[in-house]
Image (cartoon, helix red, strand yellow):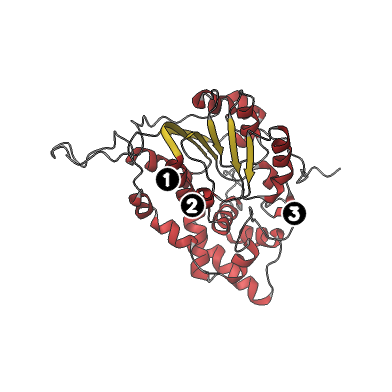
């Protein structure tokens, strides 16, 4: 029997669901945006609260069938749009009470080997989450050696990116790289064997390619900016991240655009500028899955949940967020 999860199998575990509900505190007539619908775990839980209204988005067309079931069950309270984070402004909803992001790769995508996300499969290189301009097949066969090196090193934090990129380019001179198994062999032959390292040698390169192909950093930065704009004063934005780049961006956004953002130096006079903070005082608290949840769903082990509360100030575009992470944005804009 094939142990691969079918694209139609939506049995999954929404990460840190209890914590999300506790922080959100849904009440009557709340307006909620679920920015990563996936299998619908968060949306379904929010809809259990009487008269809550949920708008969900997801870039993956594979979730459409599940979303339509919810639209049929809650015709006046649930609406789904196939959109990316960066397209959030297209939805005509404002003064929102709660926005939730569950970042990264869903089990639905990872377990469907035909999607080419997993290095355990021998399928066509793809790694597209939906509404993509390019695939991993395009990237791996068309990026220059220097660009491949930068993608793998920066987005995957792979120390041996130089050798991996060089061997990819040398391999494709004779033959186009078409499937995951070919790429796995190239990576394994490029890396020094470390028997103490429990991480699969392909993990970081596959992560880097996935992030690049889906422009995940660009989508995240534009998405959380647009989501904040839609929040009402006192509204909450919750973000669950799974790798260090995502968490660094979220932490910077919440910290540097909150009322308690640090001054350059305690010896300098306090600024008399008008308060333009987007969030109330941010306590920099990080929540992690319980041991019980990790035992039930091992993929939740690296999850980090951060949240912030929208201030009463008018929305000011966070240009410093773009400036801070411009190197990632420039990297994801490389033409393939």
Number of residues whose C-alpha sits closer than 10 Å to that of mark 3, classed few (under 14), some (14–19) or many (20 or more):
some
Q: What SS does tag 2 mark?
A: helix
Residue annotated with mark 3: 114
Position of 195 compared to 160: left or right?
A: right
Q: Which SS class for mark 1?
A: helix
Direction right: furthest residue:
1
Q: Position of residue 233 (x, y in %)?
A: 39, 32
Distance of label 3 from label 2 (alpha carbons): 24 Å
* Residues at marks 3 and 1 touching, judged by CB atoms closer than 8 Å: no
Evaluate whether residue 76 shows in this view. yes
Viewer-nearest residue: 5 or 273: 273
Q: How far is the residue under mark 2 from the one under mark 1?
A: 9 Å
Q: Which mark is residue 297?
A: none
**Residue shown at the point (65%, 31%) measured from the top left:** 44
**Residue 48 spot, x, y in % from top left:** 64, 25
Residue 9 appears left or right of 90: right
Circle 2/circle 1 CB separation < 8 Å: yes
> For this rendering, which residue is in front, 239 or 144?
239
User: Which sits earlier in the primary sequence, circle 2 or circle 1?
Assistant: 2
At x 69%, y 58%, the residue is 180
Label number found at residue 249? 1
Residue 111, visible in the rendered structure: no
**Quarter occupied by the C terminus:** bottom right
Q: Residues within 10 Å of mark 2 (few under 14, many from 20)?
A: many
Q: Quadrant of residue 57?
A: top right
Q: CA distance from mark 3 to mark 1?
A: 31 Å
Judge whether 200 appears above or below 97 on screen. below
Q: Name the residue carrying label 2.
A: 217
Residue 316 in the image: x percent, y percent? 34, 46
Point out the tag, 3 or 2, that comes first from the N-terminus. Answer: 3
Q: Residue furthest bottom?
A: 174
Q: Earlier in the sequence, mark 3 or mark 1?
A: 3
């Amino acid at each position: 029997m094939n142990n691969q999860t079918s694209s139609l199998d939506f049995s999954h575990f929404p990460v840190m669901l209890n914590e999300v509900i506790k922080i959100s505190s849904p009440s009557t007539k709340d307006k909620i945006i679920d920015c990563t619908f996936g299998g619908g775990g968060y949306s379904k839980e929010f809809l259990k609260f009487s008269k809550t209204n949920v708008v969900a988005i997801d870039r993956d067309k594979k979730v459409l069938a599940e979303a339509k079931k919810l639209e049929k069950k809650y015709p006046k309270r649930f609406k789904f749009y196939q959109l990316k984070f960066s397209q959030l402004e297209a939805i005509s909803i404002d003064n929102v009470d709660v926005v939730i992001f569950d970042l990264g790769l869903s089990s639905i995508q990872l377990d469907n080997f035909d999607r080419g996300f997993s290095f355990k499969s021998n399928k066509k290189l793809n790694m597209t989450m939906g509404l993509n301009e390019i695939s991993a097949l395009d990237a791996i066969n068309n990026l220059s050696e220097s660009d491949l090196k930068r993608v793998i090193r920066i987005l995957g934090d792979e120390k041996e990116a130089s050798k991996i990129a060089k061997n990819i380019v040398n391999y494709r001179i004779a033959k186009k790289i078409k499937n995951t198994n070919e790429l796995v062999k190239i990576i394994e032959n490029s890396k020094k064997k470390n028997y103490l390292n429990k991480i699969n040698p392909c993990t970081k390169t596959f992560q880097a390619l996935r992030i690049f192909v889906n422009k995940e950093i660009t989508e995240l930065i534009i998405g959380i900016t647009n989501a904040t704009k839609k929040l009402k004063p006192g509204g909450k934005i919750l973000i669950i991240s799974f790798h260090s780049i995502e968490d660094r961006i979220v932490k910077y956004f919440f910290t540097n655009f909150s009322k308690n953002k640090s001054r350059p130096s305690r010896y300098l006079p306090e600024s008399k500028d008008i308060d333009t903070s987007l969030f109330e005082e941010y306590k920099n608290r990080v929540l992690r899955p319980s041991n019980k949840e990790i035992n039930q769903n091992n993929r939740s082990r690296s999850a980090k949940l951060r949240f912030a509360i929208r201030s009463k100030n008018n929305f000011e575009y966070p240009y410093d967020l773009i400036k801070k992470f411009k190197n990632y944005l420039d990297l994801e804009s490389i033409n393939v």
